[in-house]
Image: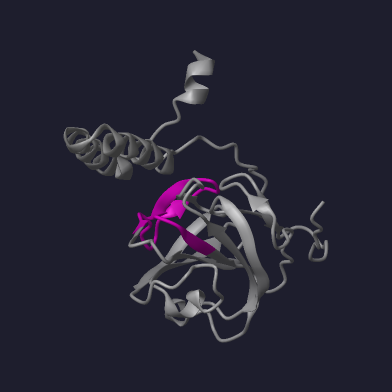
């Protein structure tokens, strides 16, 4: 039974309608040719794979900031949080995690805390790997007050082929680190703005796992980490 569960990964409910559409189109393609039908099968399997929603095992110690997204750390730098969140004009440490179309796209809360604000801003659909995507692209920005009183922000950013951001958070809501809160389809990025005295513990190029990878520790005085490809 455990082996079956490891193969049959749960599918996010947002994906059910898309998988059904892909499957219906595939049946139609088989009426045209077996070759087109085979392509439809491959695309249907990819759609199912895209919307997978596996369980994760989240570190629960207070002060830890957990990656909200699967993907590669694209940037680690200081940046000003989105102005619509009202967090001031001072730069904060920012960790940007880029999700390609093969990553799990379910997003998870980076820490325990209370949601103070959720702000949607329309924009462009530039390549999410670009720095200016943080300011120019469509986004959903969230401001959170952590259990220790510190504040952080995390921002879902639409990408080149992403056309919908799903965020289920509401102001006043209390969440736990690793809790699912939304997704972006198809290909995108999530930025995390840390408290100004937190040092990022991940480096550019590192692979993150949503709900599991620690990207910062508010209780640690360790300096920002460097990384090397080996």
Is 167 above or below relative to 127? above
User: Residue at left 49%, top 47%?
Assistant: 102
All told, the count of numbered labels is 0
Is 214 above or below relative to 130? above
For residue 56, side relative to residue 75 (left or right): left
Q: Name the residue furthest top.
A: 1
User: Residue at left 55%, top 60%?
Assistant: 98
- The figure's colour scheme reads one colour
For residue 119, side relative to residue 75 (left or right): left
**Residue closest to the eye, 96 or 111:** 96
Residue 155 image point, x, y percent: 48, 66
Is 62 above or below relative to 195? above
For residue 139, side relative to residue 87 (left or right): left
| Residue 187 shown in magenta | yes
Residue 99 image point, x, y percent: 52, 56
| Residue 147 shown in magenta | no
Residue 2 image point, x, y percent: 53, 16
Residue 74 falls in image quadrant: bottom right
Q: Which residues are magenta?
A: 166-190
Residue 160 falls in image quadrant: bottom left
User: Residue at left 62%, top 56%?
Assistant: 72
**Residue closest to the eye, 104 or 151:** 104
**Residue closest to the eye, 36 or 118:** 36
Residue 200 image point, x, y percent: 72, 63
């Amino acid at each position: 039974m455990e082996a079956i569960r490891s193969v049959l990964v749960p599918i996010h409910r947002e994906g059910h309608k898309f998988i059904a559409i892909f499957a219906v189109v595939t049946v139609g393609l088989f009426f045209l040719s077996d070759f087109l039908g085979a392509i439809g099968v491959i695309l249907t399997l990819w759609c199912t794979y895209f919307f997978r929603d596996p369980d994760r095992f989240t570190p629960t110690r207070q002060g830890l900031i957990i990656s909200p997204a699967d993907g590669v750390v694209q940037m680690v730098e200081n940046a000003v949080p989105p102005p619509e969140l009202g967090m001031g004009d001072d730069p904060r440490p920012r960790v940007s995690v880029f999700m390609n179309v093969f990553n799990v796209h379910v997003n998870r809360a980076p820490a325990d805390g209370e949601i103070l604000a959720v702000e949607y801003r329309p924009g462009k659909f530039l390549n999410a790997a670009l720095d200016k995507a943080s300011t120019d692209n469509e986004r959903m920005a969230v401001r959170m007050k952590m259990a220790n009183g510190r504040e952080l922000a995390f921002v879902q950013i639409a990408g080149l082929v992403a056309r919908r951001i799903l965020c289920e958070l509401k102001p006043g809501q209390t969440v736990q680190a690793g809790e699912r809160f939304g997704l972006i389809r198809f290909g995108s990025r999530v930025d995390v703005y840390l408290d100004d005295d937190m040092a990022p513990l991940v480096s550019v190029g590192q692979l993150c796992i949503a709900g599991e990878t620690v990207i910062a520790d508010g209780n640690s005085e360790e300096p920002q980490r460097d990384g090397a490809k080996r």
